[in-house]
Image: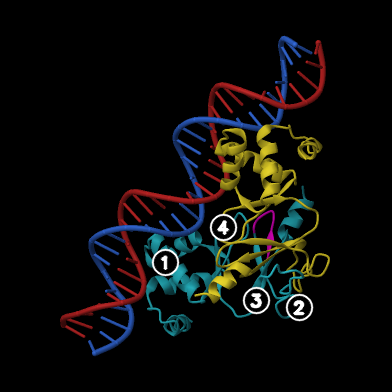
Chain colours: A cyan, B yellow, C red, D blue
Amino acid sequence: MTSTHAELLRAADLRVTAPRLAVLAEVEAHPHATAETIRQAVRDRLGTVSTQAVYDVLHALTDARILRRIEPDGSPGRFELYRGDNHHHVVCRRCGAISDVPCAVGEAPCLHASDDHGFTIEAAEVIYWGTCPECQLARTGD
Amino acid sequence: MTSTHAELLRAADLRVTAPRLAVLAEVEAHPHATAETIRQAVRDRLGTVSTQAVYDVLHALTDARILRRIEPDGSPGRFELYRGDNHHHVVCRRCGAISDVPCAVGEAPCLHASDDHGFTIEAAEVIYWGTCPECQLARTGD
DNA sequence: CACTAAACTTGAATGATTCCGGAAAATGAA
DNA sequence: TTCATTTTCCGGAATCATTCAAGTTTAGTG
Protein backbone atom coordinates (compact mmCIF):
# COMPACT_ATOMS: atom_id res chain seq x y z
CA MET A 1 0.00 0.00 0.00
CA THR A 2 2.74 2.35 -1.00
CA SER A 3 0.26 4.82 -2.43
CA THR A 4 -1.00 5.54 1.03
CA HIS A 5 2.49 6.40 2.15
CA ALA A 6 2.94 8.76 -0.76
CA GLU A 7 -0.33 10.41 0.14
CA LEU A 8 0.78 10.81 3.72
CA LEU A 9 3.88 12.60 2.51
CA ARG A 10 2.05 14.86 0.10
CA ALA A 11 -0.50 15.74 2.72
CA ALA A 12 2.36 16.93 4.87
CA ASP A 13 3.93 18.95 2.06
CA LEU A 14 6.86 16.62 1.88
CA ARG A 15 8.30 15.39 -1.40
CA VAL A 16 7.77 11.78 -2.24
CA THR A 17 11.18 10.15 -2.49
CA ALA A 18 12.43 6.60 -2.51
CA PRO A 19 14.23 6.86 0.83
CA ARG A 20 11.12 8.19 2.51
CA LEU A 21 8.88 5.51 1.09
CA ALA A 22 11.38 2.85 2.07
CA VAL A 23 11.60 4.18 5.62
CA LEU A 24 7.83 4.23 5.92
CA ALA A 25 7.52 0.71 4.57
CA GLU A 26 10.13 -0.49 7.00
CA VAL A 27 8.66 1.20 10.05
CA GLU A 28 5.28 -0.18 9.15
CA ALA A 29 6.74 -3.68 8.80
CA HIS A 30 8.83 -3.42 11.96
CA PRO A 31 7.49 -0.97 14.51
CA HIS A 32 9.91 0.24 17.20
CA ALA A 33 12.90 -0.15 14.91
CA THR A 34 16.02 1.91 15.57
CA ALA A 35 17.62 4.28 13.07
CA GLU A 36 20.35 1.75 12.44
CA THR A 37 17.95 -1.12 11.81
CA ILE A 38 15.96 1.08 9.49
CA ARG A 39 19.10 2.12 7.65
CA GLN A 40 19.97 -1.50 6.94
CA ALA A 41 16.49 -2.33 5.78
CA VAL A 42 16.33 0.70 3.53
CA ARG A 43 19.71 -0.13 2.09
CA ASP A 44 18.45 -3.61 1.30
CA ARG A 45 15.47 -2.16 -0.48
CA LEU A 46 17.24 0.58 -2.40
CA GLY A 47 20.83 -0.51 -2.76
CA THR A 48 22.31 2.29 -0.70
CA VAL A 49 21.35 5.11 1.58
CA SER A 50 23.51 7.37 3.63
CA THR A 51 23.11 7.26 7.36
CA GLN A 52 22.45 10.94 7.14
CA ALA A 53 19.54 10.52 4.77
CA VAL A 54 17.93 8.10 7.18
CA TYR A 55 18.25 10.53 10.04
CA ASP A 56 16.97 13.36 7.87
CA VAL A 57 13.95 11.34 6.81
CA LEU A 58 13.26 10.21 10.34
CA HIS A 59 13.44 13.78 11.49
CA ALA A 60 11.22 15.14 8.75
CA LEU A 61 8.61 12.47 9.25
CA THR A 62 8.65 12.84 12.99
CA ASP A 63 8.24 16.60 12.74
CA ALA A 64 5.36 16.06 10.33
CA ARG A 65 3.77 13.69 12.85
CA ILE A 66 3.86 10.84 10.39
CA LEU A 67 6.22 8.98 12.68
CA ARG A 68 6.54 9.02 16.41
CA ARG A 69 9.84 8.62 18.15
CA ILE A 70 10.14 6.84 21.50
CA GLU A 71 13.25 6.31 23.53
CA PRO A 72 13.13 4.00 26.53
CA ASP A 73 16.03 4.66 28.93
CA GLY A 74 19.30 3.36 27.65
CA SER A 75 17.99 2.55 24.19
CA PRO A 76 18.65 4.46 21.00
CA GLY A 77 15.60 6.18 19.55
CA ARG A 78 12.90 3.95 18.09
CA PHE A 79 10.21 4.78 15.57
CA GLU A 80 6.64 3.79 14.89
CA LEU A 81 3.87 5.15 12.70
CA TYR A 82 2.21 8.05 14.38
CA ARG A 83 -1.32 7.38 15.53
CA GLY A 84 -3.58 9.84 17.23
CA ASP A 85 -4.33 7.48 20.07
CA ASN A 86 -2.00 8.04 22.94
CA HIS A 87 -0.95 4.50 23.47
CA HIS A 88 2.02 3.50 25.59
CA HIS A 89 4.69 0.82 25.64
CA VAL A 90 5.81 -2.17 27.64
CA VAL A 91 9.53 -2.81 27.54
CA CYS A 92 11.13 -6.09 28.55
CA ARG A 93 13.98 -5.57 30.99
CA ARG A 94 15.74 -8.69 29.80
CA CYS A 95 15.63 -8.55 26.01
CA GLY A 96 14.41 -5.05 25.26
CA ALA A 97 11.32 -6.24 23.37
CA ILE A 98 8.69 -3.54 23.06
CA SER A 99 4.94 -3.91 22.70
CA ASP A 100 2.17 -1.39 22.39
CA VAL A 101 -0.31 -0.90 25.18
CA PRO A 102 -3.56 0.87 24.61
CA CYS A 103 -4.46 3.52 27.11
CA ALA A 104 -5.54 1.90 30.34
CA VAL A 105 -8.35 4.30 31.09
CA GLY A 106 -9.52 4.80 27.55
CA GLU A 107 -8.31 8.36 27.33
CA ALA A 108 -5.12 9.97 28.53
CA PRO A 109 -4.63 8.07 31.77
CA CYS A 110 -2.27 9.63 34.22
CA LEU A 111 -2.76 12.98 32.63
CA HIS A 112 -3.83 14.59 35.82
CA ALA A 113 -0.86 15.06 38.06
CA SER A 114 -1.89 15.60 41.64
CA ASP A 115 0.61 18.42 42.09
CA ASP A 116 1.78 19.91 38.84
CA HIS A 117 4.06 22.60 40.33
CA GLY A 118 2.39 25.16 38.11
CA PHE A 119 3.34 23.31 34.93
CA THR A 120 0.89 23.25 32.05
CA ILE A 121 0.70 19.57 31.22
CA GLU A 122 0.23 18.67 27.58
CA ALA A 123 0.94 14.97 27.44
CA ALA A 124 1.76 11.98 29.54
CA GLU A 125 4.14 9.34 28.35
CA VAL A 126 4.05 6.00 30.08
CA ILE A 127 6.56 3.21 29.87
CA TYR A 128 5.83 -0.05 31.61
CA TRP A 129 8.88 -2.09 32.55
CA GLY A 130 8.53 -5.82 32.87
CA THR A 131 9.38 -9.18 31.42
CA CYS A 132 8.09 -10.47 28.13
CA PRO A 133 6.54 -13.93 27.71
CA GLU A 134 9.64 -15.41 26.06
CA CYS A 135 11.96 -14.22 28.80
CA GLN A 136 9.60 -15.51 31.46
CA LEU A 137 9.93 -18.95 29.91
CA ALA A 138 13.69 -18.59 29.58
CA ARG A 139 13.99 -17.62 33.22
CA THR A 140 11.98 -20.64 34.30
CA GLY A 141 14.41 -22.78 32.40
CA ASP A 142 17.49 -21.42 34.20
CA MET B 1 24.28 14.85 57.20
CA THR B 2 27.20 13.11 55.61
CA SER B 3 27.05 10.31 58.14
CA THR B 4 23.75 9.21 56.65
CA HIS B 5 25.32 8.96 53.26
CA ALA B 6 28.17 6.87 54.61
CA GLU B 7 25.64 4.59 56.23
CA LEU B 8 23.76 4.24 52.97
CA LEU B 9 26.96 3.14 51.30
CA ARG B 10 27.93 0.66 54.03
CA ALA B 11 24.46 -0.79 54.08
CA ALA B 12 24.91 -1.52 50.38
CA ASP B 13 28.35 -3.08 50.90
CA LEU B 14 30.02 -0.23 49.11
CA ARG B 15 33.18 1.40 50.37
CA VAL B 16 32.87 4.90 51.69
CA THR B 17 34.98 7.18 49.53
CA ALA B 18 35.25 10.90 49.02
CA PRO B 19 33.97 10.83 45.43
CA ARG B 20 30.91 8.84 46.45
CA LEU B 21 30.09 11.12 49.34
CA ALA B 22 30.54 14.15 47.13
CA VAL B 23 28.28 12.72 44.46
CA LEU B 24 25.61 11.94 47.02
CA ALA B 25 25.84 15.40 48.53
CA GLU B 26 25.54 16.95 45.10
CA VAL B 27 22.60 14.87 43.98
CA GLU B 28 20.84 15.65 47.22
CA ALA B 29 21.48 19.36 46.74
CA HIS B 30 20.53 19.33 43.08
CA PRO B 31 18.16 16.56 42.08
CA HIS B 32 17.93 15.67 38.39
CA ALA B 33 21.52 16.72 37.75
CA THR B 34 23.39 15.25 34.79
CA ALA B 35 26.66 13.34 35.03
CA GLU B 36 28.49 16.36 33.69
CA THR B 37 26.94 18.76 36.18
CA ILE B 38 27.72 16.37 38.96
CA ARG B 39 31.29 16.03 37.77
CA GLN B 40 31.79 19.77 37.97
CA ALA B 41 30.27 20.01 41.41
CA VAL B 42 32.33 17.13 42.71
CA ARG B 43 35.46 18.65 41.26
CA ASP B 44 34.65 21.88 43.10
CA ARG B 45 34.29 19.98 46.34
CA LEU B 46 37.31 17.73 46.01
CA GLY B 47 39.71 19.53 43.73
CA THR B 48 39.58 16.93 40.96
CA VAL B 49 37.73 13.87 39.82
CA SER B 50 37.96 11.96 36.62
CA THR B 51 34.94 11.77 34.45
CA GLN B 52 35.32 8.06 34.71
CA ALA B 53 35.11 8.04 38.48
CA VAL B 54 31.86 9.97 38.32
CA TYR B 55 30.34 7.48 35.93
CA ASP B 56 31.61 4.59 38.02
CA VAL B 57 30.10 6.07 41.15
CA LEU B 58 26.84 6.87 39.44
CA HIS B 59 26.67 3.33 38.17
CA ALA B 60 27.49 1.71 41.48
CA LEU B 61 25.00 3.83 43.37
CA THR B 62 22.30 3.27 40.80
CA ASP B 63 22.82 -0.47 40.88
CA ALA B 64 22.65 -0.36 44.66
CA ARG B 65 19.37 1.55 44.43
CA ILE B 66 20.81 4.48 46.28
CA LEU B 67 20.33 6.63 43.23
CA ARG B 68 17.74 6.49 40.51
CA ARG B 69 18.51 7.39 36.95
CA ILE B 70 15.94 9.00 34.69
CA GLU B 71 16.36 9.99 31.07
CA PRO B 72 13.68 12.06 29.40
CA ASP B 73 13.87 11.78 25.61
CA GLY B 74 16.74 13.68 24.16
CA SER B 75 18.32 14.48 27.50
CA PRO B 76 21.43 12.91 28.96
CA GLY B 77 20.82 10.76 32.03
CA ARG B 78 19.81 12.53 35.21
CA PHE B 79 20.07 11.35 38.78
CA GLU B 80 18.12 11.71 41.98
CA LEU B 81 18.17 9.99 45.36
CA TYR B 82 16.28 6.74 45.16
CA ARG B 83 13.05 6.72 47.08
CA GLY B 84 10.69 3.84 47.42
CA ASP B 85 7.72 5.92 46.34
CA ASN B 86 7.15 5.65 42.67
CA HIS B 87 6.88 9.29 41.85
CA HIS B 88 7.06 10.66 38.36
CA HIS B 89 8.34 13.75 36.57
CA VAL B 90 7.11 16.77 34.67
CA VAL B 91 9.49 18.03 32.04
CA CYS B 92 9.27 21.46 30.46
CA ARG B 93 9.38 21.28 26.68
CA ARG B 94 10.93 24.73 26.43
CA CYS B 95 13.69 24.81 29.02
CA GLY B 96 13.99 21.22 30.14
CA ALA B 97 13.23 21.93 33.78
CA ILE B 98 12.18 18.87 35.72
CA SER B 99 9.96 18.59 38.78
CA ASP B 100 8.79 15.66 40.82
CA VAL B 101 5.17 14.62 40.74
CA PRO B 102 3.77 12.35 43.39
CA CYS B 103 1.72 9.45 42.12
CA ALA B 104 -1.63 10.73 40.95
CA VAL B 105 -3.65 7.87 42.36
CA GLY B 106 -1.72 7.42 45.55
CA GLU B 107 -0.22 4.14 44.53
CA ALA B 108 1.23 2.98 41.26
CA PRO B 109 -1.14 4.69 38.88
CA CYS B 110 -1.12 3.38 35.37
CA LEU B 111 0.29 0.14 36.57
CA HIS B 112 -2.53 -1.85 35.12
CA ALA B 113 -2.18 -2.03 31.41
CA SER B 114 -5.40 -3.03 29.75
CA ASP B 115 -3.64 -5.45 27.43
CA ASP B 116 -0.21 -6.47 28.62
CA HIS B 117 0.62 -8.90 25.79
CA GLY B 118 1.62 -11.48 28.35
CA PHE B 119 4.27 -9.24 29.87
CA THR B 120 4.81 -9.32 33.61
CA ILE B 121 4.68 -5.66 34.52
CA GLU B 122 6.93 -4.53 37.35
CA ALA B 123 6.86 -0.78 37.14
CA ALA B 124 5.29 2.11 35.33
CA GLU B 125 7.31 5.16 34.55
CA VAL B 126 5.45 8.31 33.68
CA ILE B 127 6.78 11.47 32.17
CA TYR B 128 4.50 14.47 31.82
CA TRP B 129 5.46 16.91 29.11
CA GLY B 130 4.40 20.50 29.48
CA THR B 131 5.51 24.04 30.12
CA CYS B 132 6.92 25.28 33.40
CA PRO B 133 5.65 28.45 35.11
CA GLU B 134 8.68 30.52 34.05
CA CYS B 135 8.33 29.57 30.41
CA GLN B 136 4.61 30.30 30.50
CA LEU B 137 5.43 33.83 31.58
CA ALA B 138 8.16 34.13 28.98
CA ARG B 139 5.79 33.02 26.27
CA THR B 140 3.21 35.57 27.34
CA GLY B 141 5.85 38.23 27.04
CA ASP B 142 6.75 37.34 23.45
C1' DC C 1 12.29 21.31 -20.48
C1' DA C 2 14.30 24.52 -17.09
C1' DC C 3 14.41 26.18 -12.60
C1' DT C 4 14.58 26.27 -7.59
C1' DA C 5 13.88 24.67 -3.20
C1' DA C 6 14.01 20.50 -0.91
C1' DA C 7 16.39 16.22 -0.24
C1' DC C 8 20.49 13.40 -0.57
C1' DT C 9 25.61 12.56 -0.42
C1' DT C 10 30.20 12.27 1.77
C1' DG C 11 33.04 13.25 5.45
C1' DA C 12 34.07 15.09 9.73
C1' DA C 13 32.55 16.48 14.47
C1' DT C 14 30.09 16.24 18.83
C1' DG C 15 28.20 14.56 23.21
C1' DA C 16 27.38 10.94 26.34
C1' DT C 17 29.05 6.95 27.87
C1' DT C 18 31.97 2.83 28.09
C1' DC C 19 36.18 -0.14 27.73
C1' DC C 20 40.96 -0.86 29.10
C1' DG C 21 44.98 -1.55 32.08
C1' DG C 22 47.32 0.16 35.81
C1' DA C 23 47.80 3.08 40.25
C1' DA C 24 45.80 4.33 44.65
C1' DA C 25 43.11 3.75 48.53
C1' DA C 26 39.61 1.37 51.85
C1' DT C 27 38.62 -2.38 54.64
C1' DG C 28 39.51 -6.52 57.45
C1' DA C 29 43.02 -9.45 59.44
C1' DA C 30 47.55 -10.15 61.70
C1' DT D 1 49.80 -0.28 62.93
C1' DT D 2 51.08 -2.72 59.02
C1' DC D 3 49.78 -5.77 55.36
C1' DA D 4 47.17 -7.99 52.00
C1' DT D 5 43.26 -8.05 49.34
C1' DT D 6 39.95 -6.13 46.72
C1' DT D 7 37.53 -2.25 45.43
C1' DT D 8 37.64 2.05 43.47
C1' DC D 9 39.84 5.67 40.86
C1' DC D 10 42.63 7.51 37.13
C1' DG D 11 44.14 8.70 32.25
C1' DG D 12 43.49 7.73 27.72
C1' DA D 13 41.42 5.65 23.89
C1' DA D 14 37.21 3.84 21.85
C1' DT D 15 32.22 3.41 20.74
C1' DC D 16 27.58 4.60 19.80
C1' DA D 17 23.96 7.57 18.37
C1' DT D 18 23.34 11.64 16.32
C1' DT D 19 24.37 16.11 14.18
C1' DC D 20 26.86 19.67 11.43
C1' DA D 21 28.70 21.35 6.93
C1' DA D 22 29.06 21.93 2.17
C1' DG D 23 28.39 20.41 -2.21
C1' DT D 24 25.39 17.57 -5.55
C1' DT D 25 21.11 15.64 -7.08
C1' DT D 26 16.24 15.49 -7.79
C1' DA D 27 11.10 16.26 -7.21
C1' DG D 28 7.73 19.22 -8.38
C1' DT D 29 6.29 23.66 -10.58
C1' DG D 30 5.60 26.82 -14.45
Q: Is residue A49 left or right of residue B121?
A: left
Structural crowding at the residue carrying mark 3, measured as other residues with C-alpha within 10 Å and reported as few (<14), some (14–19) or many (≥20) = some
Q: CA distance from mark 4 to mark 2?
A: 29 Å
Residue identifier under label 3: A86
Vertical position of residue A1 compared to residue A28: above or below: below
Kind of residue sitting beneath label 1: Asp
Are discs 1 and 4 located on one and the same chain? no
Image coordinates for residue B69, horizontal then vertical, percent: 67, 52
Tag of residue B75:
4
C-alpha distance separating marks 2 and 1: 36 Å
Point 46% across, 68% down: residue: A59
* Quadrant for the N terminus of chain B in the image: top right
Mark-to-mark CA distance, 1 and 4: 20 Å
Q: Quadrant of residue C18?
A: top right
Q: Position of residue A139 (x, y in %)?
A: 76, 51
Q: Chain of mark 1?
A: A
Q: Are the residues flagged by discs 4 and 2 from a single subunit?
A: no
Determine the CA span between mark 3 and mark 1: 25 Å
Name the foreground residue: C11 vs B19: B19
Q: Is label 2 on the same chain as label 3? A: yes
Question: Please, what secondary structure does the residue beneath circle 3 have?
Answer: loop
Name the chain letter of the residue that bears numbered label 4. Answer: B
The magenta stretch spans which residues? A90-96
